[in-house]
Amino acid sequence: MASTSQSGPILAVNAGSTGVKLRLVDRGERATSIDSLVDAPESLAAVGHRVVFGGSRFTASVLIDDDVLRDLAQEIGVAPLHNASALTLIREARAAFPDVPQIAAFDTAFHATLRSEAALYAVPESWRTDFDVRRHGFHGLSVEWAVDRAPELLNRPPKDLRLVVCHLGGGASATAVRGGCSIDTSMGFSPLEGLVMATRSGSLDPGIPLHLIVTAGMDPREVQRILNEESGLVALAGTADMREVEARAQTGDEAAQTALAVHDHRLAATIAAMAASLGGLDTVVFTGGIGEGSARVRAEVARRLAFLGLGIDSTRNVDEEGDRDVSADGAVVRTLVVHSREEVAIARAARRILARTIDRKVTA
């Protein structure tokens, strides 16, 4: 059993749609992977949990207690691929480390700054007030890290920087950021909206699931499952792995080529929409497994959005590790690749909570 120590590492627990990552983050923000909770060292400062959906109840990180856990359990249905596993891990970590503070860091919290024109759906007020139907946004922890890194890579102050951050992985979203704040984003009420993803459909006519349920008689839960687990790339190309889709497309596979065309069209169109929300565009940031790992995706986006001022240098746009600027010389809009470090964002949130807790004890 670990005991709490303010100088100890933060155990960052990241339950994503495609797996769970456990990272120990020290005070210098160096991260080390571990395989399971039992591998955590003594003297943890805290355990920080990525929780994908906090809704309007949680617009900032919180110290987890029984009341918070109960409230989180009520939100599982909005992000079924994520929140259920996060809750399981929270319960396991609380049992394993009963004396260590547990903190929830929410992906949706970064988007609490969305303006009403971007956040509201044109639906009855009772839906908005009784069921919290609005655009919540997701991938906030990844976007937060990218927003911190971009000004450093560009050597520009963050105050007026207009960014579109594309988190492309198993889930995918694009977020418009100005002055460090989210002002628009492609994911909405749930992680289903927006871009074509590995197994999720992205945006589609809401009449489609209604037709399948009301007219075709399909079970609503089955429709929900298919839209989350059997759509996106896997529906179009037969695989959820972008690397495999790209490799098959190179050999002339028509299904793979079609899947890439649909994926790229939706991505470029969404970035352009985010630029409209920003009133212009300074930088596009690619992060996440596909964003960092697919030179083809980055090059294709730049080609489609050349009219906005994007341009990529093919000698820089290679699949390698590390944060970098892959822009062509003279490109009006810069293109960055930033390695996603959600574990650092989680650890920073946890340490802020710890600091406030200590301050309250000192002043009490």
Image (tube, helix red, strand yellow):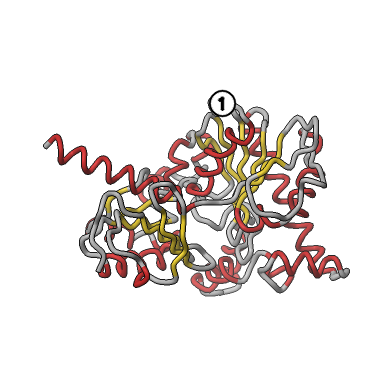
- Kindly identify which residue carries mark 1: 157
Residue 304, how many percent across, how many down?
Answer: 80, 44
Q: Nearer the viewer, residue 12 or 310?
A: 12
Residue 295, compared with residue 335, is above or below; it is: below
Residue for point 34% across, 49% down: 350
Q: Residue furthest right?
A: 252
Q: Nearer the viewer, residue 218 or 28?
A: 28
Residue for point 50% across, 55% down: 190
Residue 182, how many percent across, how many down?
Answer: 51, 37
On screen, residue 267 versus residue 349, left or right, reads right
Looking at the rendering, in which quadrant would you find the C terminus?
top left
Residue 36, how many percent across, how many down?
Answer: 40, 71
On screen, residue 156 versus residue 110, left or right, reads right
On screen, residue 285 versus residue 268, left or right, reads left
Q: How would you rate the neighbour count of disc 1 (Cα within 10 Å): few for under 14, some for 14-19, many for 20 or more?
A: few
Tally of numbered discs: 1
Looking at the rendering, in which quadrant would you find the N terminus?
bottom left
Residue 311, compared with residue 38, is above or below; it is: above
* Numbered disc 1: secondary structure: loop
Residue for point 30% across, 48% down: 62
Residue 251, how many percent across, how many down?
Answer: 87, 70
Residue 225, compared with residue 172, is above or below; it is: below
On screen, residue 221 versus residue 361, left or right, reads right
Residue for point 85% across, 66% down: 250
The amino acid marked with disc number 1 is: Pro
